[in-house]
Image (cartoon, rainbow, N blue to C red):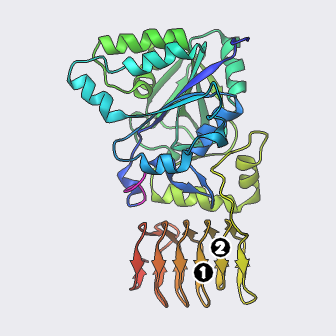
């Protein structure tokens, strides 16, 4: 078997943000719901699946893995359940503890990389929603003949969080990088690093060993971003759809723009399919009195009221007389009779009782936490 294009992957899901609470109180950013039926982790996993990468090493924060296993199951949707496929889930804090004890905290990473027998390794995360063709990136990486290729997208610097990485290139194409908060003389468009790299595995093994010997922090993704200015790095410009999930507002907007057909088609129905957990349910039921305008709905919903400019996830209910406008309703939530929900995010299994009003603004949508039962109005204008 020819392994000359084989890739393995290190998928880091340890990014966190207080600005995404309470949505991330019970789940990592990677399993935040998206567009009625997807989770954010579907995007990196689908990019890997589309490039036939079936050896994946994932890291999560302690206490955040229940929703991950609920979603991934056997991994069959992403081709991770084959005879030769392997996916591993590790806890970042275990590596941190090994480092504190003076032990070899990158031993599991090195063992995975060596056993993969893959000449190339993909390093990526889950907070950027994008659909990258990794085979195209690998082709450019091989042509460049360098050890590292990083993927970026040109965006307004206002779309970057303070610790996102901005790339700049001099006249000779030499790259430098810095955190957004260190950026001087920001331009209208800057090259935002998507925390996605393809590197030569042999080089990565040496790099990881060197970092461990030096006692550096126990995060390969962080180390690579911080140290790449020290190497001759190749770059790949991604020109497709991208959202950067940094806070409630950016998460809300990333979902709402899926109501625009161009964005929806560009992200989800390109030549690179996006896979998610399959759930066979009955179709959504619309009563004869319901009224639905410019909205998307998952399967298994019951709609008896009015829905406008909203995304309704699987198994949710909007009962008689209820109004839902410019809102995200997550799985198995219920908006009861005559309730009003506008500019809001209703998390999974929440119940809005009869006649209750939940009203926010486009700039600051109201968030109702998972499993809440709301009996009084929440109006934040």
Sequence-wise, the earlier of marks 2 and 1 is 2
Q: Do callouts 2 and 1 mark residues in contact (Cβ within 8 Å)?
A: yes
Specify the farthest residue to the front.
83
Residue 348 visible in rendering: yes
How far apart are labels 2 and 1 at the CA level?
Answer: 8 Å
Residue at the (41%, 67%) spot, across then down: 369
Magenta part, dominant SS: loop
The correct choice, above or below, for 159 with respect to 170 in the image is: below
At x 56%, y 11%, the residue is: 147
Q: Which mark is residue 318?
A: 1
Q: Quadrant of the N terminus?
A: top right
Say whether residue 326 is magenta: no
Q: Which residues are magenta?
A: 23-27
- Circle on res. 301: 2
Say if 311 sits above or below 17 in the image. Answer: below
Eyeballing the image, is 13 above or below 197? below
Residue at the (70%, 29%) spot, across then down:
51
Q: Check residue 24 for magenta coloring.
A: yes
Between 22 and 330, the one lying in front of the other is 330
Q: Is residue 202 left or right of residue 108?
A: right
- Return the x and y of residue 367 as percentages of the image width and height: 44, 68
104 left or right, relative to 5? left
**Is 317 or 364 nearer to us in this picture?**
317
Q: Residues within 10 Å of mark 2 (few under 14, many from 20)?
A: many
Closest to the observer: 364 or 346? Answer: 346
Is any part of residue 342 visible from this angle? no
Q: Nearer the viewer, mark 2 or mark 1?
A: 2
């Amino acid at each position: 078997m020819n392994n000359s294009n084989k890739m393995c992957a290190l998928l880091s899901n340890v990014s966190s943000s207080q600005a995404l609470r309470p949505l991330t109180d019970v789940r990592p950013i990677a399993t935040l719901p998206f567009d009625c039926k997807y989770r954010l982790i579907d995007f990196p996993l689908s990019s890997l699946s589309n490039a036939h990468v079936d050896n994946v090493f994932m890291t999560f924060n302690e206490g955040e893995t229940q929703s991950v296993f609920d979603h991934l199951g056997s991994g069959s949707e992403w081709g991770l359940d084959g005879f030769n496929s392997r996916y591993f889930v590790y806890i970042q804090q275990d590596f941190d503890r090994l480092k504190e004890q003076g032990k070899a905290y990158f031993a599991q990473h090195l063992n995975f990389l060596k056993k993969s027998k893959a000449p190339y390794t993909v390093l990526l995360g889950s907070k950027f929603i994008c659909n990258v063709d990794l085979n195209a990136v690998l082709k450019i990486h091989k042509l460049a003949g360098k050890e590292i290729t990083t993927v970026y997208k040109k965006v307004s610097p206002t779309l970057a969080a303070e610790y996102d990485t901005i790339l700049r290139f001099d006249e000779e194409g030499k790259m430098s990088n810095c955190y957004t908060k260190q950026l001087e003389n920001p331009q209208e468009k800057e090259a935002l690093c998507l925390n996605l790299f393809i590197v030569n595995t042999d080089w990565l093994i040496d790099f990881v060993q060197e970092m461990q010997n030096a006692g550096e922090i126990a995060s390969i993704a962080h180390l690579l971003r911080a140290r790449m200015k020290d190497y001759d790095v190749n770059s790949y410009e991604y020109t497709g759809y991208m959202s950067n999930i940094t806070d409630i507002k950016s998460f809300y907007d990333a979902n709402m723009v899926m109501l625009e057909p161009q964005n929806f088609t560009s992200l989800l129905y390109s030549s690179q399919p996006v896979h998610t957990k399959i759930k066979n349910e009955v179709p959504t039921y619309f009563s004869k009195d319901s009224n639905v305008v410019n909205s998307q709905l998952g399967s298994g919903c019951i709609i008896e009221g009015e829905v406008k400019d909203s995304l309704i996830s699987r198994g949710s209910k909007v009962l008689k007389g209820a109004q839902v406008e410019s809102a995200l309703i997550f799985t198995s939530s219920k908006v009861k009779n005559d309730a009003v929900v506008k500019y809001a995010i209703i998390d999974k299994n929440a119940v809005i009782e009869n006649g209750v009003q939940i009203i926010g603004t486009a700039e600051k949508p109201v968030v109702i936490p998972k499993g809440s039962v709301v009996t009084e109005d929440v109006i934040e204008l």
